[in-house]
Image: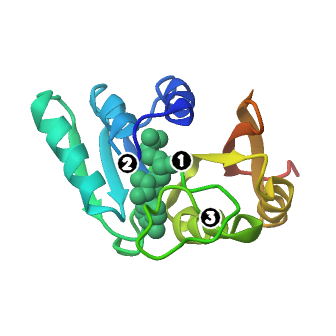
């Protein structure tokens, strides 16, 4: 299971400043981001494909006697949700390294070529974003961030950098994705 790391704290720093009533986190890992949001009485749906990550999130929620509500879902992205569910904020620190996933390997890192994992994630979760909703997505400069950004802009989304931090061999970027406001008449 993915332990809280530099990128987890970068995301945390951003999402803790945003007001949202219903939040979806894809890839909750240890639960660090979801549980910080639950502390503020937000209703959070935390999803992870890794059962151990789901158990860890739920155990930490109970152990800390938090006030809010967390629903923990063991599943692939948002494929478990019915049509019409909407979230004010969606957050994901997904696997983002441009390598292929090996069988039996922890699914926390490998994203495939051309930001393949994030492309599938976006197709899957963007329909769940409320009209005025926002999505925070972590990416590495080692992956095809420009191509991903271009695709989103072509589909009518506004893509901004909420944070960008340089590390030894890469930059960790958090994109803030929202729907473009309609052009004035
Ligand atoms: C980089 S870790 C981030 C964990 C945590 N959010 C954090 O910031 O510390 C990525 C997480 O995505 C999960 N994941 C990978 N593929 C997934 C999928 N198809 N659906 C849901 N979660 C997935 C992994 O199990 C892992 O917990």
Mark 1–mark 2 distance (CA, rounded to whole Å):
9 Å
Ligand 1's image quarter is: bottom left
Q: CB of residue at label 2: within 8 Å of ligand 1?
A: yes
Mark 3–mark 2 distance (CA, rounded to whole Å):
16 Å
Q: Which residue is mark 2?
A: 29
* Residues tagged 3 and 2 counted as in contact (Cβ below 8 A): no
Does residue 57 sit above or below 37 in this rendering? Answer: below
Q: CB of residue at label 1: within 8 Å of ligand 1?
A: yes
The residue at the point 37 percent across, 45 percent down is 22
Name the N-terminal-most of marks 1 and 2: 2
Q: Is residue 66 visible?
A: yes
Residue closest to the eye, 156 or 159: 159
Q: Which residue is mark 1?
A: 93
Residue 100: x and y in percent read 63, 71
The residue at the point 26 percent across, 62 percent down is 51
Residue 135: x and y in percent read 58, 48
Q: Which residue is mark 3?
A: 111
Q: Which type of secondary structure does the marked residue at label 2 adopt?
A: loop
Q: Nearer the viewer, mark 1 or mark 3?
A: 3
Residue 33: x and y in percent read 40, 36
Residue 5: x and y in percent read 49, 33
* Residues tagged 1 and 2 counted as in contact (Cβ below 8 A): yes
Name the N-terminal-most of marks 3 and 2: 2
| Residue 76 placement, left or right of 41 | right
Crowd around label 2: few <14 · some 14–19 · many ≥20 (10 Å) = many
Mark 1–mark 3 distance (CA, rounded to whole Å):
11 Å
Q: Quadrant of residue 77?
A: bottom left
Q: Is residue 90 visible?
A: no
């Amino acid at each position: 299971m993915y332990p809280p790391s530099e990128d987890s704290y970068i995301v945390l720093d951003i999402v803790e400043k945003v007001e949202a009533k219903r939040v979806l986190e894809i890839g909750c890992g240890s639960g660090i981001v979801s549980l910080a949001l639950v502390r503020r009485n937000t209703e959070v749906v935390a999803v992870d494909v890794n059962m151990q990550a789901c158990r860890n999130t739920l155990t930490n929620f109970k152990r800390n006697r938090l006030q809010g509500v967390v629903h923990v879902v063991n599943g692939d992205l948002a494929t478990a949700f019915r049509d019409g569910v909407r979230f004010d904020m969606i957050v994901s620190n997904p696997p983002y390294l441009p390598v292929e996933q090996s069988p039996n390997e922890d699914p926390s890192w490998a994203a495939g070529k051309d930001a393949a994992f994030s492309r599938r994630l976006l197709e899957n979760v963007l329909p769940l974003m409320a009209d005025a909703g926002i999505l925070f997505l972590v990416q590495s400069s080692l992956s095809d961030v420009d191509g991903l950004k271009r695709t989103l802009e072509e589909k009518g989304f506004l893509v901004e950098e909420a944070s960008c931090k340089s590390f030894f061999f890469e930059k960790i970027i958090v994109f803030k994705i929202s729907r473009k406001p309609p052009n004035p008449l």
